[in-house]
Amino acid sequence: MQEAALEQAAGLNPPTTKERPWLFGLLVAPNAVLAYGIIAGVLSYLLRKQGVGIGRSSEIISLLILPQTIYFLWSPITDFWIRRRTWLMLGAVASALTLAAAFHGRRLDSSTSVALMFLSACFGQLIVSSCGGMMGTLRSEAARRKAGSVYQAAALAFGALGVFILARLAERMGMGPLGWVAAALIALPSLAALAAPEQTRERGQSIKTTFACIWQEFKSTFLRWRAVPYTLLMLFPMASGALIGLLPGIARDYHVSGQQIAWMNGLAGALLTASGALVAPLIPARIRASVAYLSVCLLNQALLVILWLGPLSPSTYFIGATLYLFTIGICYAMFTAVVLEFLGQSGKSGCGRYSIINSLGNVPVVYMTALDGRGGKLWGARGLAGTDAVVGAIGAAILLTYFLTRKHTEAPVPSTVLAETI
């Protein structure tokens, strides 16, 4: 009787439409423009254009990045009341409007403008949680791999496109009009959510039954021994991508010019990482995501030996950075596949559980940035890459050994809660 109630609460209805994993490349576009194109992209340039110092700019950007780590606090709302694709569009529009309001302020570094941009960043994370919940509805492993691949590749591509458009227009228009352009770049791509497959859902369940279903899903995902290695996989240091932002800082040690740095770590770097993400689906779906991810992580860390032990020359930098950025793109795509493997099916709480898991994955970026920087301070440019290579390889080797010696079991969400609400 209880199982039947949980099934009904989950809205268990078999999907009637074909899976379209490529669609997630468009669904992530609004947040990609905001997070990578504006906050981590063109914003520092716009602040400097208004005479804001480097220190103050860094403080503002660090604050605006914070929602990416703590968004699990409010993202579970996208599992309730309206469909996830509707939440995605609402999040994009709200994010776009608050950002436009921030750009209409007297200065971008004013308290009001910073508060509005922070609110915009918080709204933007509703897009991420909605995408995660919808990806969890994909049934086949191949579709999940493809979705994770285009999701990561498109995030980088749309971010780079946002930087390109806004940086060029910043020379020709004021902050107010530029804010409306930025808002359009965020809001308009969210209309792609209208193409997301619609699934019916049961209404009229009691709150008690609904929360019993949600508790069962959370317990099946997190409160079991199987969750421990997956949690460690999220928190361990391998393939954190921390070096992406640190490589430009050591380029001159390899005698690389300013223009070469801008190219290698700008558009070319984004293309390399996006290309790597698109290659990820070539890894056979029969290889479990955790094993495939950790194997690619080991390769990524091994390639850092080029920057670690190679001569301090431009060719060393270009070869090492190219291989690192390409393989980190594969790692990013496979990381999303691991998140979905950990998540299982979305059920009633897919957005909330996805947000918790994905937030954990942002932790290594923070501590590895500090640790790599410490290695660079102690041992120079080579020490930066060497620290990341050694620490990451040890973490990947430990977890890969574990997953290779354990029998693969199905995703931890029970069959009673497989239905989704999109």
Image (cartoon, rainbow, N blue to C red):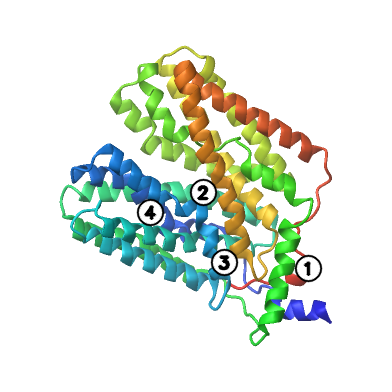
Q: Quadrant of the N terminus?
A: bottom right
Secondary element at tag 2: helix
Q: Residues within 10 Å of mark 3 (few under 14, many from 20)?
A: many
Task: For marks 4 and 3, give the one nearer the viewer.
Answer: 3
Percent position (x, y) of residue 70?
A: 51, 55
* Residue under label 1: 415
Q: Earlier in the sequence, mark 4 or mark 3?
A: 4
Identified at 58% across, 46% down, the residue is 361
Q: Is residue 397 above or below residue 113?
A: above
Report the amino acid beneath label 1.
Ser
Identified at 20% across, 55% down, the residue is 175
* Residue under label 2: 152
Q: Residues within 10 Å of mark 1 (few under 14, many from 20)?
A: few
Residue 383 in the figure: left or right of residue 250: right
For the residues labelled 1 and 4, the Cα–Cα distance comes to 37 Å
Q: Residues within 10 Å of mark 2 (few under 14, many from 20)?
A: many
* Residue under label 4: 33
Task: For marks 2 and 3, give the one nearer the viewer.
Answer: 3
Q: Residues within 10 Å of mark 4 (few under 14, many from 20)?
A: many
Dot 4 and dot 2 residues touching (CB under 8 Å): no
Task: For marks 3 and 1, give the one nearer the viewer.
Answer: 3
- In the depicted view, which residue is nearer to us: 23 or 229? 229
For the residues labelled 2 and 3, the Cα–Cα distance comes to 22 Å
For the residues labelled 2 and 1, the Cα–Cα distance comes to 29 Å
- In the depicted view, which residue is nearer to us: 187 or 356? 356
Q: Earlier in the sequence, mark 4 or mark 2?
A: 4
Secondary element at tag 1: helix
* Residue under label 3: 76
